[in-house]
Image (spheres, rainbow, N blue to C red):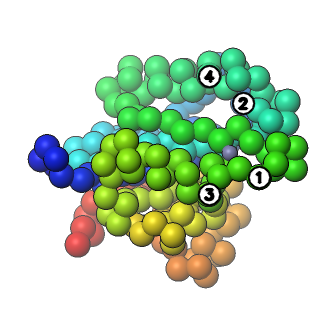
Amino acid sequence: MNAPGTQAPAAFLDRDGTLIPDRGFLTDPAGVELIEGTVRALADLRHAGFRIVAVTNQSGISRGLITWDQYRAVEAELDRQLIAAGVRLDATYVCPHYPPISGPCDCRKPALKHYRDAETLFSIDLGRSLFVGDRLSDLLPALALGGRGILVETGEGRTHAAEARDRGFDVAADLLAVVRNTLSNKD
Ligand SMILES: [Mg+2]
Ligand SMILES: [Zn+2]
């Protein structure tokens, strides 16, 4: 655990394909279902002193495929299920942009704005942080910010595993495997 005033590492977690199955553009909170092992993974991260921050690209909002109200209902349902299971996210950062329609932005992963904002808000030690997701864009911020990028093979992850390994990232079966590998190999 971290004493007051010291910096904590964070686990920056993708949502779709990492915490919940990737169902495309999810508009209905009834479609929110935790990937197996998620609750245990978050509990173990919390116990190890990590901040837990979800970072999600939701281009469906700018593309007119999801309304903000639908997005917020899905986010609230995810939070509700986690809290009911005894864990929670410290924050969720969402990029609603889709560059071909809304123009370039500084928050769509792998852009760094959300990570920098969380670093400031939660006093995060980026060098000890984890960047976890099922696409390269979830991992690439680790190269710019320090920390470790780890691909999960849930969601779209299996499709991107070879490329992730080529880029020097670790690959794990799912978020719980990430947590078990990381917390048992602490330097
Ligand atoms: Mg994903
Ligand atoms: Zn954005």
The amino acid on which the numbered mark 4 sits, given as a three-letter code, is: Arg
* Residue 173 horizontal side relative to residue 52, left or right: right
| Residue 72 visible, this angle | yes
Q: Which residue is mark 2?
A: 26
Disc 3 is placed on an element classified as loop
Can you give x and y, in whole percent of width and height, for residue 155 in the image?
Answer: 64, 50
* Residue 90 horizontal side relative to residue 13, left or right: left
Spatial CA span between label 2 and label 3: 23 Å
First in sequence: mark 2 vs mark 4 = 2
Mark 3: give few (<14), some (14-19) or many (20+) Cα within 10 Å.
Answer: some
Q: What residue sits 85% from the left and 30% below the top?
A: 64
Mark 4: give few (<14), some (14-19) or many (20+) Cα within 10 Å.
Answer: some
Give me the disc on residue 72: 4
The amino acid on which the numbered mark 2 sits, given as a three-letter code, is: Leu
Q: Which residue is mark 3?
A: 111
Q: Which residue is mark 1?
A: 104
First in sequence: mark 1 vs mark 4 = 4
Q: Nearer the viewer, mark 2 or mark 4?
A: 4
The amino acid on which the numbered mark 3 sits, given as a three-letter code, is: Ala
First in sequence: mark 4 vs mark 3 = 4
Looking at the figure, which quarter contains the C terminus? Answer: bottom left
Say above or below: 107 vs 149: above
Can you give x and y, in whole percent of width and height, for residue 125 in the image?
Answer: 31, 58
Check whether the beta carbons of the residues at disc 2 and disc 4 lie within 8 A of each other. no
First in sequence: mark 2 vs mark 3 = 2
Disc 2 is placed on an element classified as loop
Can you give x and y, in whole percent of width and height, for residue 32 in the image?
Answer: 60, 27
The amino acid on which the numbered mark 1 sits, given as a three-letter code, is: Pro
Q: Is mark 3 within 8 Å of ligand 2?
A: yes
Check whether the beta carbons of the residues at disc 1 and disc 3 lie within 8 A of each other. no
